[in-house]
Image (cartoon, grey):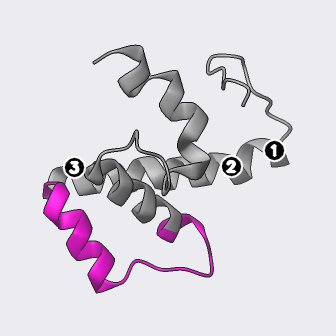
Amino acid sequence: MTETEGGLDKVAEVLTWRESKLFSEAERVALEYAEAITYTDRQVDDVLFDKVKAHFTEAQIVELTAAIALENFRSKFNPTLGVEAQGFCMVPKR
């Protein structure tokens, strides 16, 4: 996989993943799942969970759910305690 296929270009387009041609179907389902978990006005219904199960094993679903939950935890915990970015993940400018 080249950098264009899976690297910084995807990071730059993550906010427009629905329209982007860079994401695979499994990645799109994972992003939809992450949004449903993250946004309080949404939920993971049976239709979405069936889509997740079509692309991921049970162990992968547990790991994906844990990763999403951890990032949601950090998004509340870190700012509250003033924990700032350490510069390990540089998001490219759009």
Mark 2 or mark 3: name the one nearer the start of the chain: 3
Report the disc number at residue 60.
3
Between 78 and 12, the one lying in front of the other is 12
Q: Is residue 54 above or below residue 21?
A: below
Magenta-highlighted residues:
36-57
Task: Give residue 58's position: percent from left, percent from top.
Answer: 15, 58
Q: Residue at x 72, y 31 (%)?
A: 94
Quarter holding residue 7: top left
Q: Give, as a three-letter code, the residue at label 2.
A: Ser
For the point 62% across and 21% down, which residue is it? 89
* Marks 2 and 1, how far apart at CA: 7 Å
Q: Residue at x 71, y 17 (%)?
A: 87
Whether 59 is drawn above or below 11: the answer is below
Q: Is residue 40 magenta?
A: yes
Q: Secondary structure at mark 1?
A: helix
| Position in image of residue 76 (x %, y %) | 72, 53
Check disc 1 and report the residue beneath it: 79
Is 19 colored magenta in this rendering? Answer: no
Would you say 32 lies left or right of 25 here? right
Kind of residue sitting beneath label 3: Gln
Q: Which residue is mark 2?
A: 75
Q: Which mark is residue 2?
A: none
Measure the alpha-carbon separation of dots 2 and 3. 22 Å
